[in-house]
Image (tube, helix red, strand yellow):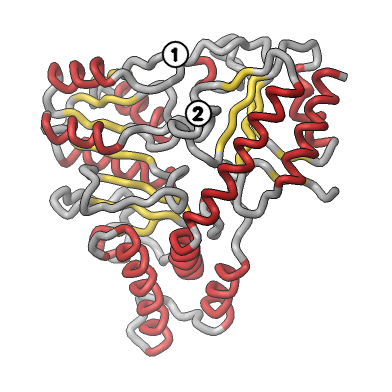
Amino acid sequence: MNRIYLDNAATTPIDRAVIDAMLPMMETNFGNPSSIHGHGREVRSAIERARKTIAGILNTSPAEITFTSGGTEADNMAIVRSIEKFDITHAITSQLEHHAVLHTLEYLASKGKIKLSYVALNEKGHIDLTHFEELLRDNPKTLVSLMHGNNEIGNLLDLDKVGQLCEDYGAIFHSDTVQTMGHYRHDLQQLKVDFLVGAAHKFHGPKGVGFLYINAKNKIQPLIHGGSQERNMRGGTENVYGIVGMAKALEIAYSGMDEHRKHVESLKERMITKLRQNIEGIQFNGDSDNLERSLYTVLNVSFPPSDEGDMFLFNLDINKISASGGSACTSGTDIGSHVLSALNASPERPSVRFSFSKYNTAEEIDFVVNKLTELVVG
């Protein structure tokens, strides 16, 4: 069997139709979109068509979509500039967030810009809504930054409940939706969210491009200065073919979402069932084995303790299986998973994140489970 790719939460293979949409912007429509001549105007039109496409899919105004280099930049822009603009003195996040959020907030807290609070989590890694509401009630001028779908364990946040609580207490709500964009439907006329983030390479688009949704009532300043691009919201010549590719990828994702979700859910369920049947003592981190409360694209598996735990991913790679993961950190110097550490996962148990896409097959899942059984059981 060919090499099997089960690391789609890290990046997805680009769709062929996306490449086809990007090629003209590389080969013939090469003008600078800031130029006023015909070559430039042609490319400017392509960018604005892409913006209109994405805005239409998300049910919002094109003026509320700002293109960025990806999710990390978009997260930084939303957090840093909203804290400045709205005189935010307090931020609420969780210890399970992506480092694009955690490191940014921790840096701002270390500089005395904000007080930072971490919402309590239950044993599965879901936020304690009672504690969350207490933090909101006790701290006016708050920014909330909580991701929709966790990139390591797949836990889903109830965006509607969190958004409503933020509105009730006058908090600004930023959500990193990088893992759910293109896999779940987001209606920005219904969601009570101020900032929302997407990255193309998580839904079969190109790397190096993303976007930030900025609710029209929350005008902020640019994070990157230098030009009047992106309607004065981001300096620098636009990544034209990336932007065009991203719009095409999101269009494809929404058009086939129900079919692809059904397929991918069946693969995840198949893997859960077969792992439980074949490997005694198997565990699943967070709520990743709960199809209702976790991303259908992510399964985080904790294997029985082993002397060869450090070699687990390496052995999978040797067997032509690409996945990612690692054990919980045992100290502050370990390069382990901060998410698993926050959940008090055992550092003795090797953990692997398997993440699926529409391109994976049942035959691949069976092959992987057989190899895992050989590695663990012998």
Q: Residue 75 location in percent, x, y? A: 36, 42
Q: Tell me the quadrant of the picture where the C terminus can be found.
A: top right
- The amino acid beneath tag 1 is Glu
Q: Residue 9 location in percent, x, y? A: 56, 42
- Mark 1 to mark 2 CA distance (whole Å): 14 Å
Tell me which residue sits at (55%, 21%) in the image: 285
Q: Nearer the viewer, residue 264 or 117?
A: 264
81, above or below 40, in the image = above
Tell me which residue sits at (27%, 60%) in the image: 59
Q: Is residue 326 visible?
A: no
What residue is shown with label 1? 123
Q: Residue 175 location in percent, x, y? A: 33, 39
Rendered image: mark on residue 83? none
Q: Nearer the viewer, residue 206 or 27?
A: 206
Give the left or right position of residue 1, taking residue 247 as reference: right
Which of the 4 image quadrants contains residue 80? top left
The crowding category of the residue bearing disc 2, from other C-alpha atoms within 10 Å (few below 14, some 14 to 19, many at least 20), is some
What residue is shown with label 2? 290
Tell me which residue sits at (55%, 68%) in the image: 18
The tally of labels here is 2
Q: Secondary structure at mark 2?
A: loop
- Going from N to C along the chain, the mark reached first, 1 or 2, is 1
Residue placed farthest to the right in the image?
378
Foreground: disc 1 or disc 2: 2
178, above or below 270, in the image = below
The crowding category of the residue bearing disc 1, from other C-alpha atoms within 10 Å (few below 14, some 14 to 19, many at least 20), is few
Give the left or right position of residue 113, taking residue 336 as reference: left
Which of the 4 image quadrants contains residue 236? bottom left
Tell me which residue sits at (62%, 31%) in the image: 353
